[in-house]
Structures are given as structure tokens and as C-alpha cells.
Amino acid sequence: MLALITGAARGIGRAIALELAKSGFDIAVNYNSSEDAAESLVNEIKALGQAVGARREIAAAKFKADVSSQEQAVKLFKDVKAEMGAVSVLVNNAGITRDNLLMRMKFEEWQEVINANLNSVYYCVKEAIRDMAKARYGRIINIASVVGLIGNAGQANYAASKAGIIGFTKSIAREYASRGITANAIAPGFIATKMTEVLKDEIKAGIEAQIPAGHIGKPEDVANAVRFFASEQSAYITGQVLAVDGGMTMC
Ligand code: NAP
């Protein structure tokens, strides 16, 4: 079975790609700007498949596309299908932040985040859903954020995009449940990646103080949840939002 992960070259996407490859999925690695990282990930996945004891070779290939563009998202799915076949598992992981207090937030900052985080999910699911419906099988996993559940000062654009993902996920879960397709969202808390490394140490310490687990999470914590939603074992679970946040939100 083929899994496509958007924004897979680094951070959480990379951990998801490796985890799904370890579970035996072939992997389509989407990237936008991180070409070298995407290439080394593809090689790492292929090496996993060739490792002693692996059940079979794992196919992996990289596909450049800016998924905030519908034209490029359409081409991405066309290219993936031609090279690797139909997508059974779609993980919408690509995302950006453009933080600012609302009074200072430019419309471009609003629009860029909505395009990259929310419109991309619409574009990719639209492209994936027909083949999934035909196969009467599919797993859609959307990476939201706890910020989409509880909001965050300085992130109105990001919170709106992530809350939008949650509403979208629940709606398509209802539309496609009878066709063997599940759609679930994962809401990570604070996870150590490039996205969060820009935060000042005192802000990180303040965040850690709000996490019952006492520390910031790892990309692998999110990848472990994705592995479950991508598996056949999660067949009776759809339209859910799972917070992977060390207990930060509990809502
Ligand atoms: P990251 O390290 O900044 O990585 C972001 C990834 O998204 C990169 O691989 C990037 O690709 C890709 N991307 C961004 N815009 C894209 C576009 N238009 N088209 C294709 N790919 C695009 O961030 P991360 O922390 O791993 O975040 C991954 C997801 O988790 C995001 O949706 C984020 O909102 C969510 N999340 C993260 C945290 C956290 O604490 N880190 C918390 C909650 C939710 P290129 O490098 O190839 O350009």
C-alpha cells in the first residue's frame, strides 16, 4: 500500500514517513524546498526496506510540489499515480506559521497560512478521494494542532487554519465512512522541530511548565499516532481529533 506524506522532507513529516515505511508502506515523499533532505529520506527508506529481516523492499520516491497551489497539488497526484500507483494513505502534514498579533497581521500573512495549511488539505484530499472511494479503502490523516482547539495569541491565522482542518476532517469522515475511508486529525502540542526551534528559551520553559508530561514532544510521538490511524486496526475510528501533547489540552 502506498502512503503519500506532504511536507515529508523534515520535521514531523520525516518521522511519519520513516514510521510508515517501517510498517511496510511504500512512501511518496512530497517536498517543496528541501530537495536534498527529501533525497536523503528516500535513500534512508529504501535502505530500511533492504535491511536484513525486512519482509520486502520498500518503494520510495520524492515529488516536488507546493501544495498551497491547486495546480501543483493536482500534478503531484498525477505524478505519484504514474510512478507509484494510487494513494491508500494520505497524510496532510505540510504547514507553516506566520505569527503576528492581529493588529499587526497583514492580509498576506493570513492568506499564506490559510493557503499552505488549509487549502492544501482540500486540494490533496480532492485528488486522493476518487481512487480511495473506488478501492473502498482509504486513510486520511490530517495534522492539525492544539492551537486549532484552544487558540493562541499571535497565531489567529494558524489557529483558524488548524480549526478549519478539524471541521473539514469531520465532514469528510461523515461523507466517506460508508466507503471504507476514515479521516482523522492529529493535534500535536509542542514538538521539537524547525517550527518551534525559533522560540526563545524562556518561552520554551513557559510552555514546558504547562505540559503535564513536563517536556516538549518529539516528531516520533506524532508519527506513532499516525501509524495507528494509517493501519487497518483503526477501521472503526473516524472523525476523531487525537491530541499528542503530553496532556497539555485534555479537551
Ligand atoms: P517544519 O519542521 O517547519 O516542517 C514543515 C514542512 O512542511 C516542511 O517539510 C516543508 O517542506 C513543508 N511545507 C510547508 N509549506 C509547504 C508547501 N506549500 N508545500 C509543500 N510542503 C510544504 O514543521 P513541523 O513542526 O515538522 O510541522 C509539520 C506539521 O505539524 C505542520 O502542519 C505543523 O503545523 C504541525 N504542527 C507542528 C507542531 C510543532 O510543535 N512542531 C505543533 C502542532 C502542529 P519544505 O521544507 O520542502 O519546503
Image (cartoon, grey):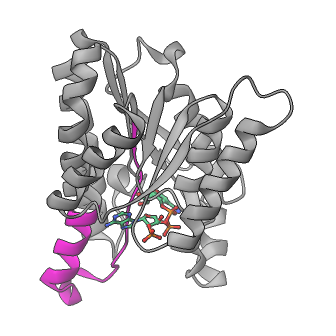
Residue at figure coordinates x 22%, y 9% from the top left: 178
Residue at figure coordinates x 48%, y 17% from the top left: 234
- Name the spot of residue 28 as percent of width and height, x first: 46, 45
Q: Quadrant of the C terminus?
A: top left
In the rendered view, does 2 fall on the left or right side of 223? left
Q: Which residue lies furthest to the right in this view?
A: 52
Q: Which residue lies furthest to the front in this view?
A: 82
Q: Work out whether residue 243 can be spotted.
A: yes
> Which corner quadrant of the figure contains ligand 1?
bottom left
Along the line of sight, the residue nearer the viewer: 250 or 226: 226
Determine whether 84 is above or below 177 in the image.
below
Quarter holding residue 20 = top right
- Name the spot of residue 154 as percent of width and height, x first: 33, 77
Residue at figure coordinates x 31%, y 83% from the top left: 100
Determine whether 114 is above or below 148 in the image.
below
Residue at figure coordinates x 62%, y 37% from the top left: 21
Quarter holding residue 49 = top right
Q: Give the range drawn in magenta.
A: 90-116
Q: Which residue lies furthest to the bottom in this view?
A: 104
In the rendered view, does 246 fall on the left or right side of 182? right
In the image, is residue 181 part of the stretch drawn in magenta? no
